Amino acid sequence: MKKIIVTFSMLMLFLSCGKYKELNKEEKYSLLYKAEILQKKDARKEVNKIYKSLDKYIAKNDDKALKEKEQYEDIVYFLKNVSRNYRTNTIGWNIFDDKSIKYPSLEEVIGKGEEPVNAQFRLYLDNRIIYDYLTDKPFTGTAIYRLGNGNITEVVSIKDGKTDGYIQKNRYNGEGTLIREEYFDENKKMKGYKKYTSQKALVEELYVLERYPNGEIKRDYIKINGSEKGKLRLYNSKKVIISQEEK
């Protein structure tokens, strides 16, 4: 009996030998992102190994292996198109050379739970609906948009495939230098901003502390030129400052 069990185990091992590695869509995407976009040698080696195994089964008219290979190719096609557009996403007439291109990390692209994901490499637009590439379902969550050099342009909230509002919006001058960062609350009202010179020096930062029922600012706090202290300001309903105190 023991001999029969051993023989059967060896048979199963023989049959499984050389079987291609099966990955789900997220695993395929992660591996290909590392190989195609981040240019990781170990990931490229793993992809080539999987392709070689798949090709053996495809040569034997294995439909499942063929579908597996097609999904890899579809992901590569998607990644190359996105990468091409990402590299040309600039401000003004700036052109990023290869050394200036900075791709999002794999962690930002895949995301976990409620973590923000990279919009360009994770989402796609179809008939005015924003879809999650990994699930092909309307996306709900937070997405980050970047320039080709990695600088953030927008962080947005998306619900059921529709943009629900800004969380952060960055503004750049014609040379691509950050000159203003704006932050928004859950009511889509600006809750603060930071202004910079073209030399990247902080010249002003403001935080909205309270608003009137109509949405107008009631109290805010402002700091000038990177000072440690700022001014706490109180406005009347006509947007006029009625008091200010150094804090």
Image (cartoon, rainbow, N blue to C red):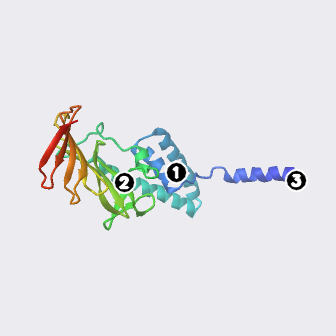
Does residue 62 appear left or right of residue 10 in this picture? Answer: left
Q: CA distance from mark 3 to mark 2?
A: 59 Å
Q: Which of these two is toward me, 167 or 128?
A: 167
Residue 233, above or below 121: above
Of 79 and 128, nearer the camera is 128
Of the numbered discs in the image, which one, if any, rests on residue 51?
Answer: 1
For badge 3, the amino acid type reads Met
Whichever of labels 3 and 2 marks the residue nearer the N terminus, that label is: 3
Query: Position of 20 compared to 169: left or right?
Result: right
- The residue identified by callout 3 is 1
Q: Residue at x 58, y 62 (%)?
A: 62
Please state, as top left, top right, bottom left or bottom right, where the C terminus lies in the image: top left
Q: Position of residue 63 (x, y in %)?
A: 56, 64
* Front label number (3 vs 1): 3
Q: CA distance from mark 2 to mark 1?
A: 34 Å
Say whether residue 219 is left or right of residue 185: left
SS at mark 1 in the image? helix
- Mark 2 residue type: Thr
Disc 3 crowd rating (10 Å Cα; few below 14, some 14-19, many 20+) is few
Residue at 51%, 51% (x, y): give it. Answer: 27
Position of residue 110 in the picture relative to residue 129 (left or right) = right
Q: Amino acid at mark 1?
A: Tyr
> In the image, is residue 31 above or below residue 165?
above
Is any atom of residue 243 visible in this view? Answer: yes
The first of marks 3 and 1 along the sequence is 3
Q: Nearer the viewer, mark 3 or mark 2?
A: 2
Which of the labelled discs sits on residue 77, or is there none? none
Residue 142 is marked as: 2
